[in-house]
Image (cartoon, grey):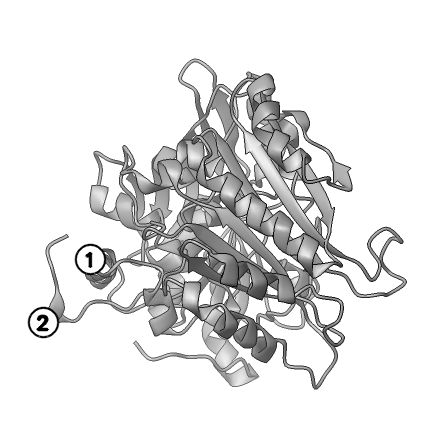
Amino acid sequence: MTDMLDTDSAAADDVAGLGTVVRGRTLYPGEEGFAAACSGWLLTVEHRPAAVVVAADAEDVVAAVRFAARVGRPVAVQSTGHGKSVPADGAVFIATGELRELSVDARAGTARIGAGLRWGEVLAAAAEHGLAPLCGSSGQVGVMGFLTGGGLPLVCRTYGFAAGHVRSLDVVTADGVLRTVSPDREPDLFWAVRGGKGNFGVVVAAEIELLPLRTVYGGELFYPGEDPVRAARVLGSYLAWAKGLPEEMSSSVTLVRFPDVPQLPGEFRGRAFVQVRVVYVGEAEQGARLVEPLRALGPEKDTCGVVPYTGITEIYQDPKGPVRTHLRSALLGELDEEAVAELVSFIDPSVSEGPFPGIELRHLGGALDRSPGRPHAVSTQGAAFLLWMRLPALAEGVDVREIADGVLERLGRWDTGAMLPGFLFDHDSAPERVRRAYGEADYRRLGALKAGYDPGRLFRINHNILPLGEGERVRS
């Protein structure tokens, strides 16, 4: 299939009839609502699709996929929440934000969720029944993007990836067929979609398991980071502490240095911090005992306590609205004293002015390292930590990507070379980087399934998995 990425008026003639095959709104460049419909959370990525379909139902998604295939346009999908991190230029852009089905079966401990829902909405609905979904650090993230990326929940060491707690998915594949996939119905496709991101179709609904969790013990501990010696002591102590944790405790540590600008509150302006965040699934008293060694390090601020599960996403205080930020990630092995010194150097106030990367390390292991009951296409590949880096997009002439490359190069000794599919961003769209998100056997299996379900790469506006060539195919 030939890529058709022009968006001039001549090329747009082929999508002019799109509005006649769907019930929902169809928007074209220049029309009111077009820019808003295809805008995402990551403002550093701009989308210039040929047309946007705001789907009214699953049948609209089917019709839009069939139309795109007929005219030779790629399909891009934005469910809701944080949205796409790969430019959707020239695509038929399907927005599923109006697919808002949400029901909870308290007896079965499950929820059925439409593609337009965000985790905050599911958290509230499940809590009415004393139940909880496996969500990440932000209630603003869309459910489907999270699940198709594998889903690293805040209680990951206890329950593993969220993908392992999906019971079934409704997905529209490249042939325009709406399929319900599960361990019993097209299990290969079910495996691939949970971790294969948007490579295998448009997920319009999911049924997930819920957990009987009403509260957790969690919060943040803030330590001053201006003194490199103290910052190193806190970070080194955290790493030693994390090694002995039970699986009921999930945690992370962030190193951040704030610029001295008037937009920031006085308590943060021009300062550096080491921030530890914890989430413990178990008795609050035991959670407090486990956190005591961190408290002994003398945090400037300590918010740890019993948290209703509906408030779990507030622990990380992620931005509520769109941001202009460059994001990068890597999977790291165990970290030693030299790694501590390198990491602390990024928040050292003696270093010249910014930009200052925010570097978060999420502790992995535990249930993430065990085979899930419902196998899926995502794995930590044995890594000890996920590194997630955020740099503010700066003024013209400052290359934040080059700065990020420099950070990762300095941490290269501890980089496993692997990545998580849910933490692939705009910089990671090249095939060789996508391949790093999967083990060799899993990537070959995904490629074989891509060749079977989407040989023409209709779904290529994503972190694209290439169809395995005829001579390379392996049994899935």
Q: How crowded is mark 1: few (under 14 residues within 10 Å), some or many (20 or more)?
A: few
On the question of residue 187 being in view, the answer is yes
Image x and y of residue 431, in percent:
35, 72
Q: Is mark 2 on a helix, strand or loop?
A: helix
Q: In the drawing, does residue 259 fall left or right of residue 123?
A: right
Res 42 quadrant in image: bottom right
Say the numbered circle drawn on residue 471.
2
Front residue (pair 297, 32): 297
User: Hey, what amino acid is under mark 2?
Assistant: Gly
Residue 424 sits above or below residue 129 on the image: below
Which residue is painted at 72% across and 44% down in the image?
222
Amino acid type assigned to the residue bearing label 1 in the image: Ala
Residue 42 visible in the shown view: no
Residue 393, image x and y in percent? 68, 71
Give how far across and how far down residue 462 sits, in percent: 43, 65
Going by the image, does 11 lie left or right of 150? Answer: right
Q: Is residue 166 above or below residue 55?
A: above
Q: Nearer the viewer, residue 326 or 295?
A: 295
Q: Name the residue under label 1.
A: 441
Q: What residue appears at the point 67 percent right and 61 percent down from the top-left corner?
A: 36
> Split into 4 quadrants, where in the image is the N terminus?
bottom left
Q: Distance between the residues labelled 2 and 1?
A: 16 Å
Horizontal placement of 412 versus 308: left or right? left
Q: Is mark 1 on a helix, strand or loop?
A: helix
Callout count: 2
